[in-house]
Amino acid sequence: MATEGSPSSRKLRKRKDKVVVVSYNILGVENASKHSDLYFQVPPGLLNWDRRKRLIRKELNHYNPSIICFQEVDRFNDLADILRKDGFIGVYKARTGEAYDGCAIFWKEELFTLSHQENIEFRNFGLRDNVAQLCVLKKVLYDSQFKHKCRSTPTKSLLVGNIHVLFNPNRGDVKLGQIRLFLEKAHSISQEWGSIPIVIAGDLNSMPQSAMYQFLASSELDILQHDRRKISRQVEYPSGYKGYRSQEEDVGSSS
């Protein structure tokens, strides 16, 4: 980690080609209201969307992102309006079926242009109603002296993938199927555009030590060695699980 003022931090600030990607599952408004048993200890005011969208913007500004990937988006127009104030534009893909939410990718308009976009509807492969996005973004040369984009051809491109994997902890086989299709499509698009770099973001509904991450890291997994119910290493908490603690409780527990 580079601390402020350190040589590595100064070096990062000097890199003009640095790209900051931020990814969040922002909790869909409809999901929060329909599954109130999961948030029964959370004060209702904290789930208010008008409040949350302002806090999301505030949180993002801490990172000064170039690209943002969201999951559980069911108020895309609200997000687009508020992020436009910070120079972002984006695209949205809704889940299939009866769900209300989907995925969204935003990027700084002064930094990138959208060259290509594809979506994956996993239901077309018998893998539930989840979706994924794949966008080829071209870096745009920017003339800081005259405050406008250069007319010359953008110099670099990258592929940004955004996915929200199935939640169900017992269906690791479906999760793996979604990830495999997602990665195969990302690789194919990257090759079509000249082996451009790939950035993968999303909510994988899996633990870092899981077989899912092993597959992501190595592109190999002997599925016969794993129980599909344990592939993600998720833990299902009962509906009465006390997962929320107020700041006051956190302070008290640390003393």
Image (tube, rainbow, N blue to C red):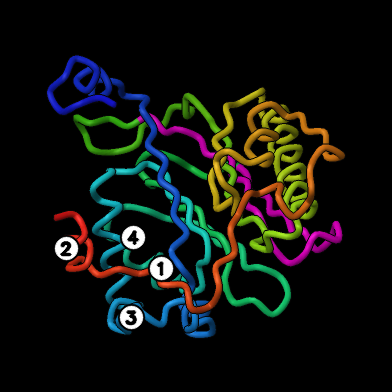
Which amino acid is tagged 2? Answer: Gly
CB within 8 Å, label 3 to label 1: no
The span from disc 2 to disc 1 (Cα, nearest Å) is: 16 Å
Upstream in sequence: badge 2 or badge 3: 3
Q: Which residues are drawn in magenta?
A: 116-141
Q: Which mark is residue 252?
A: 2
Upstream in sequence: badge 2 or badge 1: 1
Front residue (pair 167, 115)? 167
| Residue indicated by mark 3 | 48
The residue located at (73%, 67%) in the rendering is: 129
Disc 1 crowd rating (10 Å Cα; few below 14, some 14-19, many 20+) is few
Vertical side of 211 occupied by 233: above or below: below
The span from disc 3 to disc 1 (Cα, nearest Å) is: 19 Å
| Residue indicated by mark 4 | 83
The residue located at (48%, 28%) in the rendering is: 153
Which amino acid is tagged 3? Answer: Asn
Q: Quadrant of the N terminus?
A: top left
149 with respect to 115 (left or right)? left
Name the spot of residue 100 as percent of width and height, x first.
Answer: 59, 77
